[in-house]
Image (tube, rainbow, N blue to C red):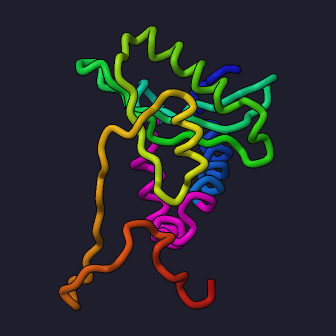
Amino acid sequence: MELHPVQVMEKDAFRAVVETYWQELMPRADVVADVIRRDAYFASQFAFEGDSRRPQWVVENQERVGFVSISIDHAAQTAFIEDFYILPTVRRRGYGRAAVQTLYTQLDALEIIQIDLSVRRDTPEALAFWEVLGFRIASYRLRQYRDLAAHQSFVGALSSDFAAPPGC
């Protein structure tokens, strides 16, 4: 298993994989439905230079099987796994676990001592995957969306909590 930085010339191919990931993870999110927001979100989530927020292909036998993106705080010796995705067609073959082990090797070389990540509550498979790798819940981050016109709260914190817009 290898991790290779996504090169600028691969941005379009990477973007196609990212949009598939977003469609699977958050199909009703504004950033998926609106092309302008999607472009801005893509630009804010990924950097194509440096070592923070730079996506890396997960490669097995010269085949791209997914990607990972991390943020690194060298001073605090911490990293945050921003995005981690293994293509649905190759899941349950050990690629995810192998990719994380390869990532650990990279982070150990950078003397990173703490790794954090977020898991959406509507992805219990992801939570189980990370727990098998030794991650544990360290805190709960609660969220609420407000309807400013009605001066009330929406019930839900994920795009999947809300009904799909008409025509979807």
Q: How many marks?
A: 0
Query: Vertically, is 66 above or below 109?
Result: below
Quadrant placement of the N terminus: top right
Query: Vertically, is 122 above or below 71?
Result: below
Q: Farthest left residue?
A: 151
Highlighted range, magenta: 23-47
> Whole-percent x and y of residue 39?
48, 59
Q: Is residue 52 magenta?
A: no
Which residue lies at the image location 18% right of the left edge and 86% below the top edge? 151
The overriding secondary structure of the stretch rendered in magenta is helix
Q: Quadrant of residue 154?
A: bottom left
Which residue lies at the image location 29% right of the left edge and 72% below the top edge? 145
Which residue lies at the image location 23% right of the left edge and 18% below the top edge? 75
Which residue lies at the image location 53% right of the left edge and 66% below the top edge? 32
Q: 150 or 122: which is nearer to us?
A: 122
Quadrant placement of the C terminus: bottom right
Query: Vertically, is 93 above or below 43?
Result: above
Q: 111 or 44: which is nearer to us?
A: 111
> Whole-percent x and y of residue 23?
61, 62
> Whole-percent x and y of residue 155?
35, 78
